[in-house]
Amino acid sequence: MEHSWRNFSASIVILLLVVMATEMAQVQAKECYSLHLSGRFHWLCLNTDHCSEVCRSEGKGYTGGKCLGWRDRCYCILPCALASAAAPEADQTGGSGGAS
């Protein structure tokens, strides 16, 4: 009887570890973003809500903004999915890669 109880306990522990690993992977995916200095916010950033509004109005896919740094500048938040999708478009040269 004790042997089956150990197997059951081990199964429960493994199941919990798998569930926890899955949940942690989902949380990490949600927190992936990159920061870009705002092109429209040119003054001292003291209000993160205002910075966030300006970033969303820039039309580059920014989901918000934060006041960061010792100079209190406005940085726009771009989710990783949008950042990685925009990178290949910006890298296209349309030529053979050499200067003409």
Image (cartoon, rainbow, N blue to C red):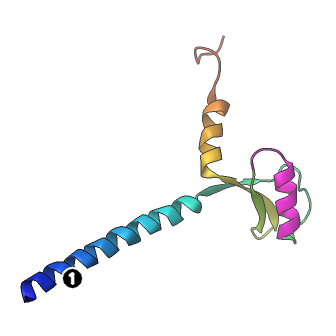
Label 1 crowding class (10 Å Cα cut-off): few <14, some 14-19, many 20+? Answer: few
Can you give x and y, in whole percent of width and height, for residue 19 in the image? 38, 69
Q: Is residue 57 above or below residue 14?
A: above
**31 horizontally vs 68: left or right:** left
- Toward the front, the furthest residue is 1
Residue placed most toward the observer, 37 or 14: 14
Screen quadrant of the N terminus: bottom left
Q: Residue furthest top?
A: 100
Q: Which residues are magenta?
A: 48-61
Q: Is residue 75 left or right of residue 100?
A: right
Q: Main secondary structure of the magenta part?
A: helix
Is residue 3 within the magenta segment? no
Instruction: Provide the residue designation for mark 1.
Output: 9
Which residue is rendered at x = 60% and y = 47% of the image? 81
Q: x, y (%) of residue 65? A: 78, 61
The residue that appears at 89% across and 51% down in the rendered structure is 40
Q: Is residue 5 above or below residue 56?
A: below
Q: Nearer the viewer, residue 38 or 20?
A: 20
Q: Amino acid at mark 1?
A: Ser
Q: Quadrant of residue 46?
A: bottom right
